[in-house]
Image (tube, rainbow, N blue to C red):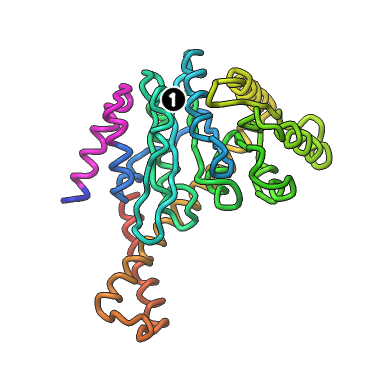
Amino acid sequence: MAESSTETTFDRLLDRVRRKDRSALARAITVLEREHRAERLLSLGSRRATVVTVAGPPGAGKSTLLGALAKELAHRELSVAILAFDPVSPRSGGAILGDRVRMLESAELPNVFVRSLAARDPSGAGSSRLPALLTLLDTYGFDLIFLETVGAGQEASPLVLLADLVLLVLVPGLGDSVQTLKAGVLEFADVLVVNKADRPDAEDLVRDLSAYYRLVAPTDLVPPILQVIATRDVGIPAVADALLAVRQRYAETGITERRRQEHAVRCWQIALSARCQRVLEEVLRERAAEAPDPLAWREPELYRELARRLHRLADSMETERS
């Protein structure tokens, strides 16, 4: 009964989302975050929206930049959605979800939608519901979907690997250039932004980045490196121009299509991993209720029970498809 209620509620929400009802979109995202079954009700199709992951170290000004960039794109009559992922406290399990505060002005625009989400998946980088969330936002009809990561480095990779474009935000003064190059995201960047460019060492960072790409990237694949001061809207139109130009070039050369084929495989992997993780957590919760001391648990029994649950999940999915 509960599953049927979820299906009915979500189907109604989807009808309203297709009619560009913002309140329905917000509610549908909440349902996706809470109801495991809801994500299966979204039919996957060819994506129309461009997904841009915005990565960079804490303190780089990603949220401020995104707010200014969304406003610029909205003035160009493009619709923009922003999903800002906030880190979850390992102690309390909560998240501040404060990124929207730095985007308040943009969030009030009719063609801009901003939502903060807790990064609750095991990697801490995004959400196991991300493929479904992207499909939902695409159903609404946004032109661009921005994903703001919790930070730079390997923890950002799940969001980076599902992006059509990666916008990397760096800032001078957060460590030497060698440490920057170790961040693990430079190789994925399609557009680089050096924020807080009024700092005296900004030119040094731009020079080091330019030298890095001259060494490792073919000339035609060197990403544009732009300097901005996001708090004063300085350089924001140039960032919008660069993003749209790279988007067009990738579409014309087949890069976008190739990446989206790779995305389809990764989305399937994310969904499969999330389902297996939920089954494992269910087994562990039940075992903890029966025997509070984990040292008393017998691993072979856990594995056998996990296998039984996974077989049951497979059977239920086969029944749904038939």
Tell me, yes or no, if residue 315 can be seen here. yes
Residue in the image at 31% along x and 28% along y: 17
Observer-nearest of 159 and 7: 159
Q: In this picture, is 275 found above or below 17?
A: below
Residue in the image at 71% along x and 28% along y: 224
Does residue 9 belong to the magenta stretch? yes
Q: Position of residue 176 (x, y in %)?
A: 72, 47
Q: Is residue 154 left or right of residue 210?
A: left
Residue in the image at 73% along x and 45% along y: 177
Read off the magenta span.
Answer: 4-27
As drawn, the residue found furthest toward the front would be 200
Q: In this picture, is 176 found above or below 252?
A: below
**Magenta segment, principal secondary structure?**
helix
Q: In this picture, is 124 found above or below 103?
A: below
Observer-nearest of 129 and 152: 152
Observer-nearest of 93 and 19: 93
Q: Position of residue 49 (x, y in %)?
A: 49, 28
Q: How packed is label 1: few (under 14 Cα within 10 Å), some, or many (20 or more)?
A: many
